[in-house]
Image (cartoon, grey):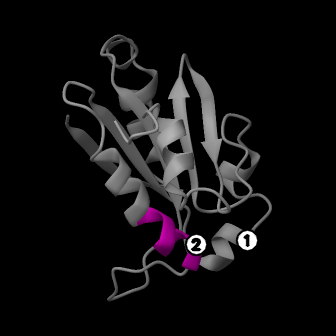
Amino acid sequence: MTVEKVDATVADFGAHFERLFASPEAAADGKVRLLLFLADREPGSSLTWCPDCNVAEPVIYERLEALPPGRDAVLLRAYVGDKPAWRDPAHPWRVDPRFALRVVPTLIRWEGGAAAARLGDDEAHLKDKVDALLGLGAGGN
């Protein structure tokens, strides 16, 4: 099991998304495709300005490590910006119908060109919910 983690901002998200999620190569490689929308990190810190993101992020990474051997994943971490940018109702990921973001963190499993499953701020920190989104069994594998 390998997890390819790629970081994106609003400015460079489109190119990363096209390469990792929308290309013919991406559609054929069989990897689990995940989008994780997060708040930006605070300057000089490993933490974001969003407490829910700080709680959910380590749980998501831990559960990704539980993917069975041979089940690879791509995780595109999309940073929404600072708090004022995120609170703007016209934020690009709020108005994009593919994502229709309302909260951070939001974890999306992407299949067949669309969101197949989604966890918001009230669920993204719950191991059983993350496991279900990843397709892990009740035992974690």
Of 122 and 111, the residue lying toward us: 122
**Quadrant occupied by the N terminus:** top left
Q: Residue at x 56, y 62 (%)?
A: 80
* Dot 2: element: helix
Residue 125: percent from left, percent from top? 53, 62
For the point 46% across and 38% down, the residue is 138
Q: Which residue is found at the position 42% from the left and 76% from the top?
A: 41
**Closer to us: 100 or 134:** 134
Amino acid at dot 1: Arg
For residue 127, side relative to residue 63 (left or right): right
Residue denoted by label 2 = 52
Mark 1 lies on residue:
87
Q: Is residue 139 above or below residue 91?
A: above
Q: Quadrant of the C terminus?
A: top left
Residue 44: quadrant of the picture: bottom left
Amino acid under disc 2: Asp
Q: Residues within 10 Å of mark 1 (few under 14, many from 20)?
A: some
**How far across and down, in percent of the image, does residue 113 sit?**
56, 20
What range of the chain is rendered magenta?
51-57
* Residue 80 counted in the magenta span: no
